Structures are given as structure tokens and as C-alpha cells.
Amino acid sequence: MTSKILKIDIPFVSGQAKIFLNNDHSAWITLEYLPQELRKYAEENFQKLFDLRDGTNTTTLRNTIVEDKLVSCALECEHYYQSYLKTPPLVANVTDFKKNYMFASSTEASNTKDSVPELFQPFHKYLGEVDYNQLVINWYERDMFLKNHTDWLGGMKKEANIALVNLNRKDANCEKRTLVIVPTNRKFKKTSAYNTFNIKLHHGLIVKLYGKAKSDYSHGIPLAENQVDRIGVTFRSYE
């Protein structure tokens, strides 16, 4: 395996770009962009979309579901988030709770809402309301981050992908954030095409994870200086 870092910085792509993460092509991602009208909609309404983090549709800052408990995870992630629609219930058999997060509902502390906020519905309609029946909206202020993790795969539909939609505040004085994708262990590092994949998160970029990219690789948003305010919407599909 090479130890090189693949830096992916595509301000815009017409159609879809496909990138294989490992040598046997069992893990891959695609990059594409929201249509121009949706990118403009997000840019013009960014503050309204961002303000929802402070309303009743958000949960407490720095709290997340890890294993089967609602815990404070300030050392692991620091951002606002909210789950919507068919979020899987909690289970107690998470094998690697340090890296496998699930923003889920529980009997003790529910953070799941039944419907997607109206302002975010245009993105759900574009991605496919039938294809994706679970959403998590993540709001990142400038000093917020999310350490590398794998998403909860229990109950996910077979062959389903995970779609990550990136929305940025328009601010020329701030840096765009980076999505970092790395193999989860030494075994997968041996067959990985690169040690690290760094994807510059331009406004309107959609990153989709396929195959073993969901299980053999982790992803996260590292802390960096002078980062732009960001909204990340994760789309998943569960049975």
C-alpha cells in the first residue's frame, strides 16, 4: 500500500466522477453537484437553514448516541445535529462504539423527528424521497468538527449508498472544510489505493459512499483554522 495522500479538489464537475478507494474496486465513492438552482437556493437561504440549529429541531450541542447511551462526546465531535424520518432504534451490540456513531432515537432521550424541515425538503426531493428514508442534518460553526467514524449499517438496505450533501456559507475570508476518508485498520490499509483521501468540500458537492467504503473506511471533518460555516446533510436508506 502507498502512504500517499490523494487530494481531491473539484470546484465543479458535470455529471458524476467515480473514485475507487481500494485495489479490488470493492470500495468506491462518487462526486457530483447539486443542480445550479439548488446551489443558489442554498446560498440565498443559508442563514435560514443555519438558524434551524437553534430551534426545536435541534438537539443539545456535543451530545450524540454512542453504543446504547446518550453521552457527551466533546472529544469526539462538536456540532449540532438532528435525525429525521426512519432512524433505526438503538441496540446494545455495537462492536466498535468508539468509531461507529448513530444519531438515533431512544426511550430515554429521543432526538428523532418525524418530518424533514420544509427548508430542507428540496434537497430530499432531489436526492430521492423513495431512495433515502433517513436523514441527519449537521450544522458546523467555525470551530466545530467531527472525528473519523463509520456510519451505522445495521438494518441498512442491501446495496444502499450513503449520500453526503455539503452546503457552505458564502464567505471569501474563510477556508472550505475537508472530508477525510481513511481505512479503518491495518488490514484494509494494505489494499487501499491511498492512505488518506482528502476531499475539499465545495458548496453543493455530493459525496456518495458505496460498497466497502461504508464499512472498511471511516470519514470525518477535522478541526482547522478559519473554517466556513457548513451544513452537512447525510442521506441513508434503512429497511
Image: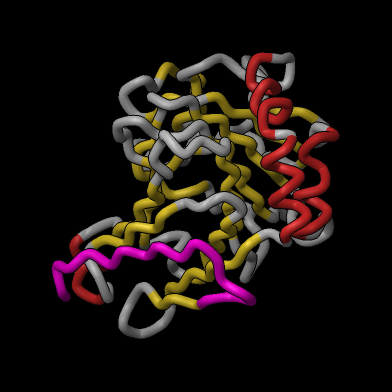
> Who is closer to the viewer here, 13 or 155?
13
What residue appears at the point 32 percent right and 62 percent down from the top-left corner?
Answer: 197
Q: Is residue 136 left or right of residue 1?
A: right
Can you give x and y, in whole percent of width and height, for residue 233 in the image?
A: 62, 43
Residue 101 on the magenta segment:
no
Q: Is residue 19 left or right of residue 185?
A: right
Residue in front for this viewpoint, 53 or 224 = 224
Task: Give yes or no for residue 11 being in the magenta stretch.
Answer: yes
| Residue beneath the point at 56% across and 71% down | 13
| Rendered residue at 46%/39% (across/down) | 172
| Image position, residue 5 (x, y; %) | 22, 64
Left or right: where 187 falls relative to 227: left
Front-most of residues 118 and 92? 118
Q: Main secondary structure of the magenta part?
A: loop
**Residue 95 at least partly seen:** no
Q: Which residues fall within the magenta stretch? A: 1-17
Q: Residue 195, percent across and down? A: 22, 64
Which part of the image, by quadrant, shows the C terminus?
A: bottom right
